[in-house]
Image: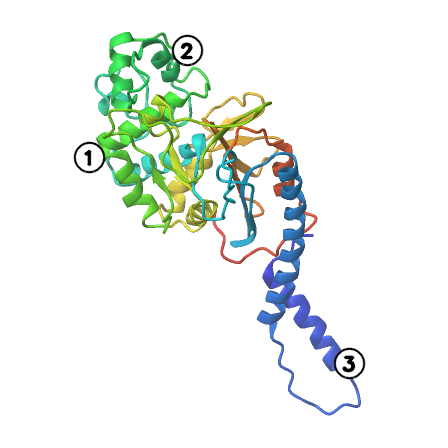
Amino acid sequence: MKMTRNTILLSLFLLLSASFFSCKGHKRGHVVIHTDSLFIDMNKEIAAKRAQQADKVFTGLARNGMNGVVLYAEQGQIIYERAFGWRDLNSRQKDSLRIDDAFQLSSDSKMFTAEAVMLLKADGKLDYDDDVRKYIPTLPYEGVTIRQLLNHRSGLPRYDAMADKHWPDRKKPFSNDAMIKMLAEKKPEVYGAPDAGFFYNNINYALLATVVESASGQHFEDFMRERIFEPLGMTHSYIYSMRDESEVSMYMPTEVHGHEMYRSGPVKTQNDYLNGVMGDKIMYSTVDDLYKFNLALDHQQLLPDSLQREMFEPGSPEWKNDENYGFGWRMTKLYPDQYFHFGWWKGYRSLIIRDAKHRRFLAILTNTTALIPTDVPFDFVADTTVQLPEAEAWAM
């Protein structure tokens, strides 16, 4: 049975009071009940049990090939965090991963791009139902709105397939501007009419990064730093930009290298010309910085609740395979209280889960392409056999 802090404290008070008044033949005295201390001690015991559950789950995943960092929080406090494995799996002197290591988030970057768009909506600089061509005039497709980009309902073509076909020099970065110019010139065939259905497509969030630049008058990476990372104290988070680079470097400038996993062993992933496109990927962050962002969503540090909650509303009337998409977050009927996103790009995999009902948060960042059985972390977050008492201050 789920109990709030007040319920627990009241029960303890009544129990202790009853014990006190039932003691006959004793001198009257003054009893001081330190309920806050009792509550804290109870929380510590429950948190320790939950941490043991977490360690069993994630140590098991590590034994089966997970190389990365994990953070689990509940009721606003970190319950468990641990690093497993190595920064560079090919190094002769292997350097162990650390909790404060930054990983590429891959598609988990999308929730931050969505937040940037929502901040501009709050600023009055755009509306969700604006035509995208108001901000990107050369886009050769009619009737596409910002909301459709956020919900993956634009029907637009894939930019990576277009670039693979038409970008001649893979040693030269392919940028958001280059993508828009190529769309205008080549006009690749769309997947469907705007708002006709859900189709997950990276081009939607790549275009949103350009919308952010057009509406704010700032480079995307600068806007993200000034409006999200710095205000929240996300000191290890950044957008990797190839804006001023004329040639693709051999490797990404990071201490935590991505790895492709082959039967013969891990191979360090080289940099890629498509890494010049921002918005849909290419953000770097740590599990602790992601936890700070989750707290900001809890306590409306960036946006008021009336605006922030739209991020978690289903964007499609239909639930394709019992799944839906809000603004940068996925949702499924299988776990109705959980909002999540997967990341997978060029040697990195990640998973972020936010459980609104039980106020739980899980971040898994890995630097290999090794598969993580997704049912294991989802079941762990949903497991209520051990749970902390509900915190008093909680907003969705």
The residue closer to the viewer here, 120 or 282, is 282
Q: In x, y percent, where is residue 308?
A: 40, 41
Distance (Cα) linking label 2 and label 3: 76 Å
Quick one: label 2 or label 3, which is nearer the N terminus?
A: 3
Residue 191 is tagged as: 2
Distance from label 1 to label 2 (Cα)? 31 Å
> Which residue type does callout 3 highlight?
Ser
Element under disc 1:
loop
The residue wearing badge 3 is 22
The residue lying furthest to the front in this view is 92
Asked if residue 308 can be seen in this view, the reply is yes
Q: Earlier in the sequence, mark 3 or mark 1?
A: 3
Query: Compared to 223, does 35 lie above or below?
Result: below
Q: Disc 2 vs disc 3: which is toward the camera?
A: 2
Instruction: Tell me the distance, in whole angstroms, between the alpha carbons under discs 3 and 1.
Output: 72 Å
Please determine whether, in this image, residue 3 is positioned above or below residue 162: below
Number of the label disc, if any, that sits on residue 217 = 1
